[in-house]
Amino acid sequence: MSGHSKWAQIKRQKGVTDSRRGQLFTKLGREISVAARQGGPDPAANFRLRLTIQKARDNNMPADNIDRAIKRGAGGADAAALSEVTYEGYGVGGAAILVETLTDNRNRTVADVRATFARAGGSLGEAGCVSWLFESKGVVTVPIQDQPGDDLAMLAIDAGAEDVKVEDDAVEVYTRPAELENVRRSLEEGGVTVTSAEIAMVPKSTLGLGEKEALQTLRLLDRLEELDDVQRVYSNADFPDSALAAYAALAGG
């Protein structure tokens, strides 16, 4: 299991505290509004909206919140003010970091992102400096429950997965972005529980870090995710088990 996957796994186990759930719903609402603005309010005809709504449901976002976000996007007023901007930089030890944001004030957002990098010993880079190290993939997470991980992996491959990673308590299924929905549906129709399914930027290769650099990078990733304008954070860091154990303990995992 790669350190990058373990980081994602610990975050899943950590869950969302009550204090951060409101922030999560706000971020999901923005994403739904932008998707509705760009592709229309009908989920059946708008793949991005359909996917974002499912993500909101996976995170127990109330249906009323989802409906309001769709109407805001269809109305165009609030959603039109939001721009999608991706920032790129480096953590301590040289790990590549991508930061996807939705913002109505680029100056505020870039200042917040730059300051967060600097406080953690990292640095904000120029556009394109690390994005080439990542590729867009569909990622489906399946918990290992009654079925062995290898059996779940075979089901995923039969469903059209490009790659599968069997972890300690979950299977990560990688697909082409266009096949994400089909693979998820096929797994669920086969009786498999799906924890999450999303389009993500997956590193083509990972960079191993020492324990000290890993802990500093983990703190940086957490602080970036806590920024109001940040939607997602990705890294190619591969974290050692000792650093992940310490991070999980701090996270209460």
Image (cartoon, grey):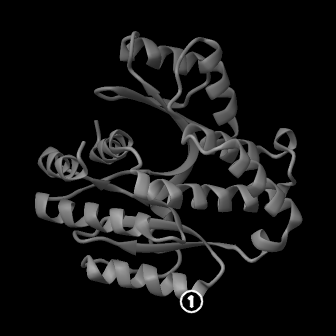
Q: Is residue 49 above or below residue 108?
A: above
Circle 1 sits on which residue? Answer: 107
In the foreground, 191 or 95: 191
Q: Position of residue 98 (x, y in %)?
A: 46, 65
Nearer-the-camera pick, 200 or 127: 200
In the image, taking residue 31 as reference, residue 205 lies left or right, namely left
Q: Identify the residue at image location x=35%, y=68%.
A: 223
Q: Position of residue 185 (x, y in %)?
A: 67, 24
Q: Is residue 184 above or below residue 58?
A: above
Residue 38 can be seen in this image: no
Amino acid residing under circle 1 = Asn
Instruction: Where is residue 13? Give x, y as percent.
Output: 34, 39
**Residue drawn at point x = 34 percent, y = 62 percent:** 222
Report which quarter residue 90 is drawn in. Answer: bottom left
Q: Where the C terminus falls, by quadrant? A: top left
* Residue 87 visible, this angle: yes
Query: How many numbered marks have been drawn onto this rendered protein structure?
Result: 1
> Could you tell me which residue is drawn at 44 percent across and 82 percent down?
112
